Amino acid sequence: MSSQQVKRDLATVHLAIDNLPGTIAGFYSLCNFTVNANPLPEPVGRRLPRTAIPAHLLGYLGVSLDYKNQGLGGVLVNAAVDAAESQTAVAASIGVVVHVLDEGLVAWYQQIGFQRIPEHPLHLIMTMADIRRLRAVER
Ligand SMILES: CC(C)(COP(=O)(O)OP(=O)(O)OC[C@H]1O[C@@H](n2cnc3c(N)ncnc32)[C@H](O)[C@@H]1OP(=O)(O)O)[C@@H](O)C(=O)NCCC(=O)NCCS
């Protein structure tokens, strides 16, 4: 699925490689995306144009069985967020959106800094404003 998306210029896939055995430990895909201004969480959703709003989509995220529960998933999400943030120097984005598979993962994304998009319980966003704020605190 991911390789088809890359071939068709629909997403970029980033791999985490464990160099010693040379195996893929995890991966994520990222692409440009648009969201509707209504409903985006406040305060970022306030007074946005009623046109499609530019964003990034964290499409696929996966960690191989041998590498689960060691923090790699969080590292990959943060790498995707950092990649999206660095791109905003060239083309703007309101934030990184993720569509989670089930309610169990919502809390996991929330502790990273994502928040629910109102009216879409399984859609979350980490706004670019929050990304910059969090990164400023971390520096
Ligand atoms: C979700 C996933 C990427 C997390 O990767 P990871 O490297 O194990 O994550 P981390 O080590 O950073 O975090 C582990 C925590 O995530 C929790 N977690 C993992 N999968 C979860 C799930 N499906 N629902 C709820 N919590 C989950 C673990 O219980 C653990 O919690 P703890 O820190 O309180 O013990 C990985 O489990 C995976 O590849 N899952 C299958 C694909 C998938 O669901 N992708 C996400 C699509 S939105």
Image (cartoon, rainbow, N blue to C red):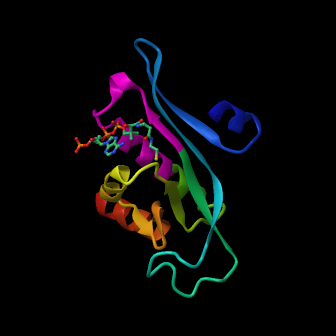
Count of labels shown? 0
Secondary structure predominantly adopted by residues drawn in magenta: helix
Closer to us: 8 or 134? 8
Residue 122, relative to residue 66: is it above or below? below
Residue 41, relative to residue 47: is it above or below? above
Residue 114: image x %, image y %?
40, 61
Residue 40: image x %, image y %?
51, 75
Q: Quadrant of ligand 1?
A: top left
Closer to us: 91 or 120? 120
Residue 115, relative to residue 3: is it above or below? below
Q: Splitting the image into 4 quarters, where does residue 55 fall? A: bottom right
Q: Splitting the image into 4 quarters, where does residue 68 fall? A: top left
Where, quadrant-wise, is the N terminus in this rendering?
top right
Looking at the image, which residue is at 45% across and 45% down? 79
Residue 14: image x %, image y %?
55, 36
Looking at the image, which residue is at 59% across and 65% down? 93
Instruction: Give the residues in magenta.
Output: 60-82
Looking at the image, which residue is at 36% across and 60% down? 113
Q: State the residue lying farthest toward the top.
A: 21
